[in-house]
Amino acid sequence: MTNPDDLARTRFFILSLLRLSGAVLVMFGLVIAAGRFESIPKVAGTAMVLIGALDFALVPRLLARRWRTPK
């Protein structure tokens, strides 16, 4: 059986990586939407900003709710 501290540490690490990936996706999308890469359409950058914001805000909360211990 796994140690509860190790499980909590692993879950915290996963949530932190998800937030970091969302923030990176938002920043990269902003760079694309600003027109720094001419080969990538600005609409793709806008979509990346929206997806990254959802990834940053919603996915960690949904996982935390799923991993919550029952009352």
Image (cartoon, helix red, strand yellow):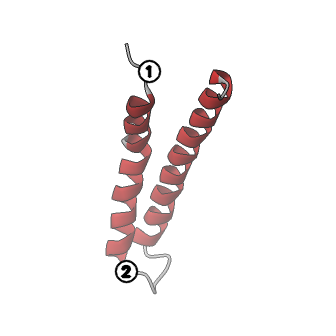
Work out how far the residue at label 1 is from the one at label 2, CA to CA, in angstroms. 44 Å
Vertical position of residue 24 compared to residue 12: above or below = below
**Residue in view at x 48 percent, y 52 percent:** 22
User: Is 46 on the left-hand or right-hand side of 56?
Assistant: left
Where 67 sits versus 17, above or below? above
Residue 1: quarter of image? top right
Q: Residue at x 48, y 59 (%)?
A: 25
Q: Residue furthest bottom?
A: 39
Query: Secondary structure under badge 1?
Result: loop
Depth check, front residue: 54 or 35: 54
Residue 5, picture quadrant: top right
Of callouts 1 and 2, the N-terminal one: 2
Q: Is residue 1 left or right of residue 61?
A: right
**How far across and how far down the image is residue 35, in percent?**
43, 76
Mark 2: few, some, or many residues within 10 Å (few <14, many ≥20)? few
The tag on residue 41 is 2
Badge 2 element: loop
Q: Residue at x 34, y 57 (%)?
A: 50
Q: Amino acid at mark 1?
A: Thr
Q: Residue furthest top?
A: 71
Residue sitting nearer the eye, 9 or 3 = 3
Would you name the residue on which mark 1 appears? 69
| Image coordinates for residue 20, horizontal then vertical, percent | 56, 48
Image point 43% across, 25% down: which residue?
Answer: 68
User: Which three-letter amino acid code belongs to the residue tagged 2?
Assistant: Pro
- Across and down, in percent, residue 12 comes to 58, 33
